[in-house]
Image (cartoon, grey):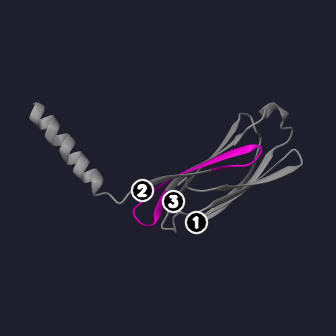
Amino acid sequence: MRQIKFLFVLIMLILGGCSSDKSFILKGESKNWKGTYNGYVYDENNEKSELTLTYKGDPSKVKDNVKYNYETGNGGGNGNVPLTQKSIKIKKTCGGCATTDKNDVVTITVSWNDKTETLKLQSKK
């Protein structure tokens, strides 16, 4: 039984090593915001990602919606949402598209309370 478990683990490690899947994290911050972009590229033209914007201050002090706009290697997006917690999460799946790379820079513009800041998320080397 022990040999079967070992063989199973060995096969999984070998198959995992042959995979073309890539995951990466891009990070950056401004005076009032921190951003993290978690990208997972599978196949050559498919990506799943999650962009997290975290407000460094007290979210109850944000009186209006937070507007954001972001640009990545495979496009971008925007939104206008209330800040009910410290973070805003944006999930995206892209199939048959150009994908974001770990060397790309994701640019985000955030507007709230009559203020605007820009963040640049990139790989930490």
Name the residue at 78% across, 51% down. Answer: 67
Relative to 81, is 75 on the left or the right?
Answer: left
Relative to 105, is 56 on the left or the right?
Answer: right
Q: Residue 51 appears at what percent x and percent y? A: 61, 49
Looking at the image, tell me whether mark 2 or mark 3 is earlier in sequence order: 2
Name the residue at 77% across, 45% down. Answer: 31
Q: Name the residue under label 2.
A: 22
Residue type highlighted by circle 1: Gly
User: Magenta span has 98?
Assistant: no
Number of the front mark, 2 or 3:
3
Name the residue at 55% across, 55% down. Answer: 123
Q: How far apart are marks 2 and 3 (CA)?
A: 9 Å
Neighbourhood count class around disc 2 (C-alpha, 10 Å): few under 14, some 14–19, many 20 upward: some
Looking at the image, tell me whether mark 1 or mark 2 is earlier in sequence order: 2
Tell me the SS state at disc 2. strand
Q: Residue 13 appears at what percent x and percent y? A: 25, 47
Residue range (magenta): 28-47
Q: State whether residue 63 is above or below residue 70.
A: above
Q: Name the residue under label 1.
A: 73
Name the residue at 51% across, 59% down. Answer: 102
